[in-house]
Image (cartoon, grey):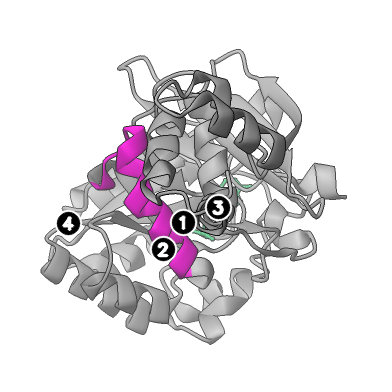
């Protein structure tokens, strides 16, 4: 819901601004209509229902995977595609994958979102409404900004959303901002904003290779970005997740695993997450299971903690980097 529009309506009608807090509390607990908001006067409920859509996003399509993952494709008021995913895990975790932009201006060569046209930054409400959509289905407790877009390029809105998420049941310690290494954003969040987690999409341990697959590396090279992550670790006292996509024959050799270890050592500021690649109709192939395991054990033998990410929602194109590209094509 556009909470700013609600604020405006209230002040124009000389109504108390705390009504917004009441509405928010209902939304955060999964309300899907003004009707349910029983501590609002009936007249006001009817008035608001006539004027304010319950969501800034319209659901265009949704899909459910055999593994319980659920994806929604939304359209903004100006018909921009936005996707979000709910992942259900056996241990009870309910994790949302949220988009911060429609499309993405960065052109990482392996990423489906990178190949679609950049639309625009999403507003605070458009990001929150992705979460509220799933909250109406069931309680949720984790969120990652790993959908479409680069969250650090839309930081004001992303941070405003992070401040709201605990109300929905998602603590800041269970919220992760994932970035290509957008340096000014990382530096800002080190000292400002809520105590969320940070993930860096590294994908290569040296500048030559990384610039080839992630052009943004020309702007913010590895040494600076990893330096900022170490500072994060020092100030925030939280390890930084390193995301490393496993691309067959590109970045998955034993030598590169050693180079990655050299980069991340000596201090143990990081946790590495190896990501099996979801083919997106480009020249890349995912690494074999053996190659991923070899890479992982090389890192572990060097004293670097590394896990392999569980892939979810493959059958519904809900896997990382695949969001909305098809709809926008
Ligand atoms: N722009 C941010 C957040 C969005 S991408 C970032 O890059 O971190 C979320 C993660 O999905 C990134 O690590 C990205 O590199 C990864 N990703 C992109 N395409 C993928 C694919 N086809 N398969 C697996 N992961 C992919």
Residue 8 visible in the displayed image: yes
- Work out how far the residue at label 1 is from the one at label 3, CA to CA, in angstroms: 65 Å
User: Of label 2 and label 3, which has the lower sequence position?
Assistant: 3
Residue 309 visible in the displayed image: no
Q: Which residue is mark 1?
A: 253
Give the residues in magenta: 155-172
- Work out how far the residue at label 1 is from the one at label 2, CA to CA, in angstroms: 5 Å
Query: Residue 256's mark?
Result: 2
Local crowd size for mark 3, using a 10 Å CA cut-off: few (<14), some (14–19), many (≥20): few
| x then y, percent, for residue 160 | 40, 59
Circle nearer the viewer, 3 or 4: 3
Q: Is residue 185 left or right of residue 57?
A: left
| x then y, percent, for residue 167 | 32, 38
Q: Per the image, is 270 magenta?
A: no
The reply to whether dot 1 and dot 2 touch (C-beta < 8 Å) is: yes
User: Of label 4 and label 1, which has the lower sequence position?
Assistant: 4
The reply to whether dot 4 and dot 1 touch (C-beta < 8 Å) is: no
Furthest toward the bottom, the residue is 219
Query: Residue 238's mark?
Result: 4
Image quarter in which the N terminus is found: top right
Q: Which residue is mark 3?
A: 13
């Amino acid at each position: 819901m556009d909470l700013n529009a609600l604020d405006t309506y209230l002040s124009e009608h000389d109504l108390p601004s705390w009504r917004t807090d009441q509405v928010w509390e209902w939304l955060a607990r999964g309300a899907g209509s003004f009707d349910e908001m029983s501590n609002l006067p009936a007249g006001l409920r009817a008035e608001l229902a006539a004027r304010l859509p319950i969501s800034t996003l319209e659901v265009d399509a949704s899909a459910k995977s055999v593994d319980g993952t659920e994806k929604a494709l939304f359209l903004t008021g100006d018909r921009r595609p936005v996707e979000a995913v709910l992942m259900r895990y056996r241990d009870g975790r309910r994790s949302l994958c949220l988009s911060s932009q429609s499309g993405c201006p960065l052109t990482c060569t392996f990423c489906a979102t990178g190949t679609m046209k950049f639309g625009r930054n999403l507003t605070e409400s458009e990001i929150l409404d992705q979460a509220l959509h799933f909250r109406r289905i069931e309680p949720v407790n984790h969120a990652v900004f790993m959908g479409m877009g680069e969250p650090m390029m839309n930081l004001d809105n992303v941070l405003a959303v992070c401040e709201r998420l605990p109300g929905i049941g998602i603590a800041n310690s269970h919220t992760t901002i994932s970035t290509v290494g957008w340096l000014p954003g990382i530096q800002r969040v080190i000292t400002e904003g809520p105590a969320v987690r940070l993930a860096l999409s590294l994908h290569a341990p040296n500048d030559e290779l990384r610039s080839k697959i992630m052009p943004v590396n020309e702007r913010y090279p590895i040494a600076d970005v990893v330096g900022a992550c170490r500072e994060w670790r020092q100030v925030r006292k939280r390890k930084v997740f390193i995301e490393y996509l496993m691309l067959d024959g590109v970045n998955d050799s034993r030598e590169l695993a050693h180079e990655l270890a050299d980069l991340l050592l000596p201090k143990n500021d990081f946790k590495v997450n190896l990501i099996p690649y979801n083919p997106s109709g480009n020249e890349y192939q995912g690494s074999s299971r053996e190659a991923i395991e070899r890479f992982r054990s090389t890192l572990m033998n060097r004293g670097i903690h590394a896990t392999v990410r569980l892939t979810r929602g493959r059958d519904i194109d809900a896997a990382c980097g695949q969001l909305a590209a098809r709809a926008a094509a």
